[in-house]
Image: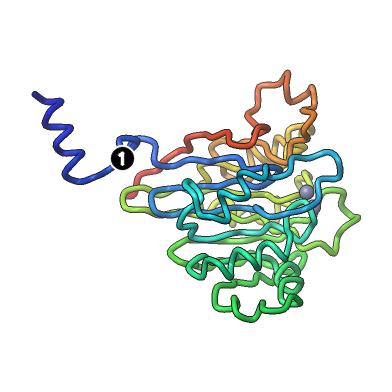
Amino acid sequence: MRLVVFCVWLILIGQPIALAHQSSATYVANEAVLITNGDKKVLFDPFFHQVFGTYQLVPEQTKQAIFSAAPPFDNLTAIVISHAHGDHFAADEVLKYMLKYPMTQLIAPEQAVTELMLLSGAKQILPQVTSVKLAFDQHPKAFEVAGLEIDAVRIPHAGWPSRAEIENLVFRVTLNSQNTSVTVMHLGDADPEDKHFLPYKSHWKERVSDTALPPYWFYFSAEGNDILNEIINAKQSIGIHVPVVIPNQLKSGTVDYFSAPGETRNIGESHKH
Ligand SMILES: [Zn+2]
Ligand SMILES: [Zn+2]
């Protein structure tokens, strides 16, 4: 009897049965990850052409699914770009997507937006674009886009002090839906040294991240692990940017990471108060 009532209730309010895990992370490729929480969906670093013979390209079928807005890639709230490197960002495809889906927002470092705006027809997407201008050592920025709470810090690119000119942004995004709130942090290609992160202690404290998405090299050094476990205020992490040939150190270790396109994880739900 109770089951019947439950079924009727489900039918009446038309909610999917997967209520308990409405928040998830879906791996696309390299550092491209889809985060969903109810009606909010954020897709990080989805379009790129380069993999340097090492990293995972977005499978053609997945790319088609994104461009045709097939679930789970339907109704994207925003696309977020970590930095303007060829294995994270392809201006032509970002433009093509934004033109096709005028309801989707783009949040990207100024460097990427500048590149995008050189393309013909790009002016048309300006109302959808939030360009984040952050200098090295500048105070983090916080803003809201389409109901998403977003903040960004400029953390140097891996290999520091080389590639210092690249505007690599660490984004923390909170996806609020009806009953739940989920926060994720995408680290782009951040350099895993304490000294880049320690100056922003109060920033990390401001909000807990349910899941951090660091490039896998964070797991390979004491400082990288310290940043993940002690500094950035994240409950857990899933490594990304994992080479197609998975390093043995990852395979034999205990940390979580994404390596096969299409993999998913349920991510923590901190219920709203
Ligand atoms: Zn990079
Ligand atoms: Zn990269």
Q: Residue at position x 48%, y 68% from top?
A: 103
Query: Could you tell me residue 12's position as x and y percent?
Result: 16, 44
Q: Residue at position x 63%, y 49% from top?
A: 63
Answer left or right for 136 relative to 271: right
Tell me the quadrant of the picture where the N terminus can be found. top left
Depth order, front residue of 203/126: 126
Answer left or right for 183 relative to 115: left
Q: Residue at position x 44%, y 42% from top?
A: 23
Residue furthest bottom in the image: 123
The residue to which callout 1 is attached is 16
Residue furthest top in the image: 252
Depth order, front residue of 223/117: 117
Query: Could you tell me residue 70's position as x and y percent?
Result: 49, 49
Q: Is residue 226 above or below residue 232?
A: above
10 Å crowding of disc 1: few (<14), some (14-19), many (20+): few
Query: Could you tell me residue 34's position as x and y percent?
Result: 55, 47
Q: Quadrant of residue 229?
A: top right
Q: Amino acid at mark 1?
A: Pro
